[in-house]
Image (cartoon, rainbow, N blue to C red):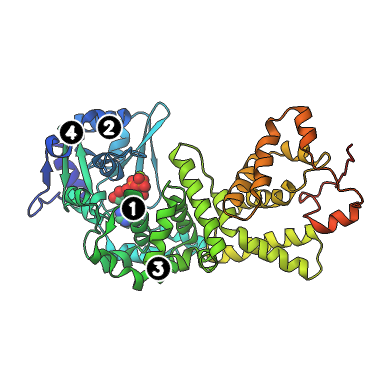
Amino acid sequence: MIRRLIKKVFGKPARPAASGPRIIPLGSHGIRREHINPCALKTTRALSEAGYSAFVVGGAVRDLLLGLEPKDFDVATNATPEQVRQVFRRSRLIGRRFQIVHVYCGSETIEVTTYRAAAPEKEAEREAEEDDDTRVAAADGMLLRDNVFGSQEEDAERRDFTVNALYYDPDKEEVWEWHGGVEDAKKKVLRIIGDPNQRFREDPVRMLRAARFAAKLDFHIDPATRAPIAELASMLERIPSARLFDEMMKLLLSGHAERGVRQLRAEGLHHGILPMLDTILDHPERQKFLHVALHDTDERVRHGHSASPAFMLASLLWFDMQAAWARNRSRGQSDQPALYDAMDDVLERQRDLLAFPRRFDGTIKEIWSLQPRFEQRSGARPFRLLSHPRFRAGYDFLLIRAKGGDAAQELADWWTRFPDASDSEREAMLIKPQPGESKSKRRKRGPRKTADGEAAIEVKLG
Ligand code: ATP
Ligand code: MG
């Protein structure tokens, strides 16, 4: 009755599929109800009790099928956003272009999406219209056109890859598929739904997603899916920079950055988005550093630690910044102004290419500007550095530099020991000025001035 009403209101009868979905029973896929997050379970149950169809969908089903732990659980339903709102007291309508509902249980949130029909020509149009941030507002006017509700079959068709178009019914413990995703998951194949050329043109970000999923899932990209990528890679230039940045960060902070970057290079996708990779890859010593930085970030993420975009950007741009700093000094600028100008230059130049938000600049600069201060191991300076609020990030960066061959391992080890050493041990560790070495002479040799502008205080010991 309610379903008939929905069909009537939206004029979109859930037309029966020519062949219907392939329904896979528990025995063949092994995903049990208990594997589903309780909040998602509560959501699908309440929706089906209200007479709607509701499935767990997308990444969660894919990951469970592969024995991975899902990042989040999304629900897809034939109830409209307004109807979903009526079922859940604790829920909120969000989204501008395509409305979705956030359902809350405790501190958890489940994203509920109404089955959506593909509107390929609209998607291409929309991407073109959103060329820059000032024009995003124009997309508001497309809200209604974009909110085209559809059947589950149509919803499956507009999703990107076959393994991302799986629907799990927690009630019956069945997986419904329309495009052979279960078989592809078994074969570890990433295959786009529909015509690859057309689907990548509709939304070029899908090319980046292909690289990301192939890396994350350890899949290989189906040859037909892969074929048009090299030719279409330059279409990424049209993508609004904020979206590109988000997608890149997903790749770099996914715990599979090393493989992800390799995949990007293999597909020729990195030129437009991470041009700094080009300069890194031209130099063997930079490659080693990049390898260490990505590997280290992956390890952190896999052990449940945080990895920050600022830290990643600081790593990717470190060599460019150092080169700019050296250039400024060779032109006669003194250390500190040379460093500050170099940091600004490099960040601005990169922003033209991969516009990353300015909110990261402060942290990136702090991480960089702490590096020369690690070299100062006499007097009161190491103590002041220890109490710097970014000491930890700066130290982590120093460790990567040491592993990557850009700083002395001895220096990194010294800073590993110093914080936990006793007073007398610390005193013994401090480097004593060489006899006969004057302050001014010392200043000429190492990185001398503190980068944050504090007065350089030399305390003579012994
Ligand atoms: P992750 O584990 O990284 O979150 P995910 O598959 O859940 O992977 P999301 O970006 O969260 O990826 O998107 C959720 C689902 O929405 C995808 O599984 C896919 O079905 C669909 N989707 C997302 N982005 C696109 C896109 N650009 N084109 C088509 N479908 C998309
Ligand atoms: Mg997801």
Q: Which residue is mark 2?
A: 36
Residue 268, which numbered label? 3
Mark 4, secondary structure of its residue: loop
Q: Residue at x 50, y 46 (%)?
A: 297
Q: Earlier in the sequence, mark 2 or mark 1?
A: 2
Q: Earlier in the sequence, mark 3 or mark 2?
A: 2
Question: Which circle, 1 or 4, is nearer the viewer?
Answer: 1
Q: Earlier in the sequence, mark 3 or mark 4?
A: 4
Question: Which circle, 2 or 1, is nearer the viewer?
Answer: 1
- Find residue 107 and report its horizontal and vertical position in percent: 43, 28
Displayed quadrant of residue 6: top left
Mark 4 neighbour class, 10 Å CA radius: few under 14, some 14 to 19, many 20 or more: some
Q: Which residue is mark 1?
A: 213
Question: Which circle, 3 or 4, is nearer the viewer?
Answer: 3
Q: Contact (CB < 8 A) between labels 3 and 4?
A: no
CA distance for labels 1 and 3: 16 Å
- Find residue 291 and report its horizontal and vertical position in percent: 50, 55
CA distance for labels 1 and 4: 35 Å
Residue at disc 1, CB closer than 8 Å to ligand 1: yes
Q: Which residue is mark 4?
A: 51
